[in-house]
Image: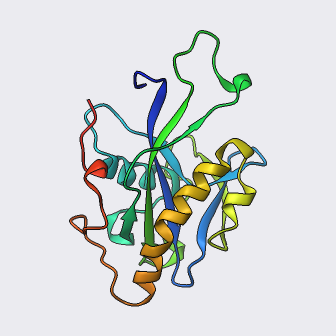
Amino acid sequence: MVDTDGFRPNVGIIVANERGQVLWARRAGEDAWQFPQGGIEPNETPLEALYRELREEVGLGRPDVAVLGATRRWLRYRLPRRMIRRGGRCVGQKQIWFLLRLVADEQRVRLDRAQRPEFDRWCWMDYWQPAEEVISFKQQVYRQALEELAGCLRVDWAGTGTGGERSPAIPAAARRRLR
């Protein structure tokens, strides 16, 4: 599914631990690290896609995480020309980003739940470091997502964060069903 501007709807997932570090994963068989992310299916909300992708990519379910916040709007990045399929309509991705706190033991992270795992390794990393480490064409979107969601993590550290799907930290865009 691609929108009229050529962007594929997608969710970006930032999972933080109690120390404010974030889960950083290596793409299977590559030397490329990134946050978990994935496409939104037709008639699926970004919030529903978040939980599906979280299970498929890192083996976590709803009880394992608390949703701390989501970006208020779609963040976009364009693919480099060499990555755009010849004659393809998709020029990049538009993403709603979610910040989650891991409430389960980190042993619950499993990269082998999918038939073809997306990742083969993971580690905890300083909150801001992924914006420097990710492939260059994604760096701006990573910075935007991390900057917008950093306040949600600070609120959570203060002990006043929420984990519910009805939290005011979850904007309407994250609940809207795609057609």
Residue at position x 57%, y 25% in the image = 91
Q: Is residue 1 above or below residue 30?
A: above
Front one among 148 and 131: 148
Q: Position of residue 72 (x, y in %)?
A: 37, 55
Q: Position of residue 34 (x, y in %)?
A: 64, 53
Q: How many marks?
A: 0
- Of all residues, the one furthest to the top in this rendering is 87
Pick the quarter of the image with the C terminus: top left
- Of all residues, the one furthest to the left in this rendering is 166
Q: Is residue 175 left or right of residue 151?
A: left
Q: Is residue 34 left or right of residue 176?
A: right
Q: Is residue 103 left or right of residue 117?
A: left
Q: Is residue 114 left or right of residue 33?
A: left
Q: State which quadrant residue 125 falls in.
A: bottom right
Residue at position x 64%, y 62% in the image = 24
Q: Position of residue 135 (x, y in %)?
A: 73, 46
Front one among 172 and 46: 172
Q: Position of residue 38 (x, y in %)?
A: 48, 43
Q: Is residue 112 above or below residue 106?
A: above
Residue at position x 25%, y 70% in the image = 164
Front one among 66 and 72: 72
- Of all residues, the one furthest to the right in this rendering is 31
Q: Is residue 96 above or below residue 79?
A: below
Residue at position x 51%, y 48% in the image = 37
Q: How is the image coloured?
A: rainbow
Pick the quarter of the image with the N terminus: top left
Q: State which quadrant residue 25 falls in.
A: bottom right
Q: State which quadrant residue 127 falls in.
A: bottom right
